[in-house]
């Protein structure tokens, strides 16, 4: 998850104008405090209460009427919508009224910043989605810098020269120097015009922010409101809401709708009550809290995997960094021997010979040859699981030391078996970890059903996840030891041309002739049969042939 990714950093900080509403989440997940910095100048913006209408028709007519009233007195308007479809619908209504406007809906990235920058001009109407043009300062009267750059484009300057025109870096480029001179002239000219226009806009009431509906998050609404009234400028904001909006359904609009119907309220009659605004804000808090709980729930599940992930990746990092794994491998061999012997004896205090032979049978394919380990009748009565494990371990270590000598040294002087240990360990860890991830995903998918049995799903996930992880670790240990004992290093043979002699029967009689032996056909295992190599899954069950040696067939 993103949360666990961010928490990997040693230091975490950030800056935003709308973090205060998410204070609880920052504290709970990242252990971060929120510090509010006061504004440079007192806020002069008037945040009007929301107006609530019976349905969309009444709300849309009121929106157009508000835009027309502001446009008539020269007050610029920024209309915020929650979707592209809504912004295009409002645009179509304005076209019918003959009101000139710009539409920003993330379809024209190149001009977005420029259009938003000019949204503060006298009488300007701009329709934008909540995401469009963020981070651009809307200056009352227009932005002289953007206007000056537009003039440079018309004059034929290239984009590189225009980008450098506002800079102060030293240069000998004649084109850039000419662009800077032209830019300074045009900036002074436009600044004079925009300053005069800004005064008219201030007199008209500043930028008017019109929200077509409330967003699920108060943070997004605050971002929209915050585009007006910057640096002490005047401004206004108001949200227009219909009882059919998504956020109102969460608030429980059916009750209010019933009241409006019984009172015979006209669809063009607004409900302008502060009580409603606070109720809507409470509905937003409820949605935010629900979304936070959802994210927190996802994080709780991921925290289980995060602990396991750290253990596996730490071991994997040792392998990749080329650390000597000899001590780890010998520890694995000892653990494998002791657990296998203990499981084979099944807790018997005085095991008989049959039980001992069954306990030793898994080692037969790895390092224990028939007759290597003899237990006399006089030793039987005093034999314990630890005693038998010590005897087997001694044979295992002797076999492994002999194998190390047989494989020899690499050109660097390091025993070849050290590299074999790294390769085998990395391969086995990767295979088992990928299978474990798939298993945990499947577990996560159905764990929610445990809630019907009054079991907290997260607790059940933690418990079963831990058990599966333990099984996986045991599987990695067993498979690593098995592969290390059975691995053979194949050296490249030199190609030699040899004569092929044919066995021809002698003419003297049939006894001296060499008979051609019939070919023995080995039965190929089925795709769903256990793989002949004996590899086990993390859960202890044998792997199918199609998932192991027969994967490429």
Image: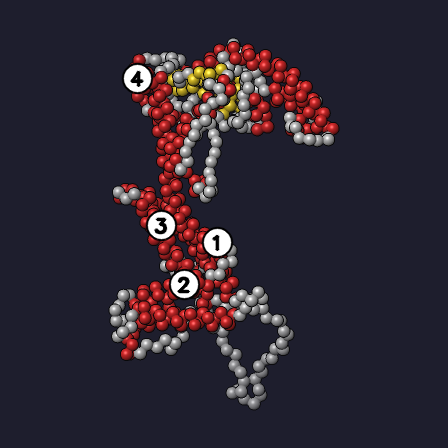
Whole-Å distance between the Cαs marked 2 and 4? 76 Å
Q: Earlier in the sequence, mark 2 or mark 4?
A: 4
Residue receiving disc 2: 331
SS for dot 4 = helix
Where residue 322 appears, as percent x and y from the top left, is 51, 58
Q: Which residue is drawn at 49% across and 57% down?
A: 319
SS for dot 1 = helix
In the displayed structure, 23 sits above or below 45; it is: below
Query: Is residue 363 or residue 191 the one in the foreground?
Result: 191
Where residue 218 appears, as percent x and y from the top left, is 41, 26
In the displayed structure, 431 sits above or below 499; it is: above
Q: Which mark is residue 497?
A: none
Residue receiving disc 3: 465
Q: Residue at x 33, y 67 (%)?
A: 341
Mark 1 against mark 3, which lies toward the viewer? 1
Q: Residue 317 carries which label?
A: 1
């Amino acid at each position: 998850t993103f949360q666990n990714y961010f928490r990997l950093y040693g230091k975490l900080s950030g800056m935003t104008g709308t973090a205060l509403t998410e204070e609880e989440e920052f504290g709970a997940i990242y252990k971060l405090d929120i510090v509010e910095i006061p504004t440079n100048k007192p806020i002069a913006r008037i945040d009007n209460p929301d107006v609530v209408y019976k349905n969309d028709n009444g709300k849309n007519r009121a929106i157009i009427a508000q835009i027309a009233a502001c446009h008539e007195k020269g007050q610029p308007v920024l209309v915020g919508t929650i979707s592209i479809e809504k912004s295009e619908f409002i645009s179509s209504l304005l076209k019918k009224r003959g009101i000139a406007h710009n539409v920003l809906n993330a379809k024209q990235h190149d001009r977005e910043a420029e259009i938003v920058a000019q949204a503060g001009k006298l009488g300007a109407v701009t329709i934008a989605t909540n995401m469009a043009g963020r981070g651009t300062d809307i200056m009352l009267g227009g932005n002289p810098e953007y206007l000056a750059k537009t003039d440079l484009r018309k004059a034929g300057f290239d984009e590189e020269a225009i980008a450098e025109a506002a800079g102060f870096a030293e240069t000998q480029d004649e084109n850039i120097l000419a662009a800077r001179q032209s830019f300074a002239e045009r900036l002074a000219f436009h600044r004079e015009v925009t300053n005069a226009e800004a005064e008219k806009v201030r007199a008209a009431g500043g930028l008017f922010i019109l929200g077509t509906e409330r967003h699920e998050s108060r943070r997004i609404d605050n971002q929209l409101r915050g585009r007006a009234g910057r640096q002490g400028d005047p401004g206004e904001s108001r949200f227009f809401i219909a009882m059919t909006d998504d956020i109102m359904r969460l608030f429980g609009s059916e009750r209010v709708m019933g009241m409006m119907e019984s009172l015979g309220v006209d669809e063009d009659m607004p409900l302008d009550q502060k009580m409603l605004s606070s109720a809507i804000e409470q509905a937003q808090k409820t949605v935010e809290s629900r979304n936070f709980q959802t994210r927190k729930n996802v994080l709780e599940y991921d925290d289980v995997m995060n602990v396991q992930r750290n253990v596996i990746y730490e071991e994997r990092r040792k392998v990749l960094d080329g650390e000597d794994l000899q001590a780890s491998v010998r520890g694995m061999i000892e653990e494998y021997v002791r657990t296998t012997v203990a499981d084979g004896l099944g807790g018997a205090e005085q095991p008989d010979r049959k039980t001992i032979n069954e306990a030793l049978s898994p080692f037969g394919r790895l390092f224990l040859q028939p007759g290597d380990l003899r237990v006399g009748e006089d030793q039987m009565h005093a034999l314990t699981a630890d005693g038998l494990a010590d005897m087997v371990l001694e044979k295992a270590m002797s076999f492994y030391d002999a194998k190390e000598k047989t494989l020899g040294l690499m050109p660097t002087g390091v025993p070849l078996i050290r590299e074999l240990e790294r390769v085998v360990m990395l391969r086995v860890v990767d295979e088992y970890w990928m299978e474990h991830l798939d298993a945990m995903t499947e577990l996560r998918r159905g764990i929610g059903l445990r809630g019907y049995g009054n079991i907290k799903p997260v607790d059940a996930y933690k418990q079963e996840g831990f058990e599966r992880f333990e099984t996986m670790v045991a599987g990695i240990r067993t498979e690593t030891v098995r592969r290390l004992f059975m691995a053979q290093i194949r050296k490249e043979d030199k190609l030699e041309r040899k004569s092929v002699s044919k066995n021809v029967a002698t003419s003297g009689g049939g006894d001296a002739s060499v008979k051609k032996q019939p070919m023995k056909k080995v039965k190929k295992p089925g795709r769903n049969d256990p793989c002949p190599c004996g590899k086990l899954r993390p859960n202890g069950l044998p792997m199918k042939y199609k998932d192991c040696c027969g994967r490429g067939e």
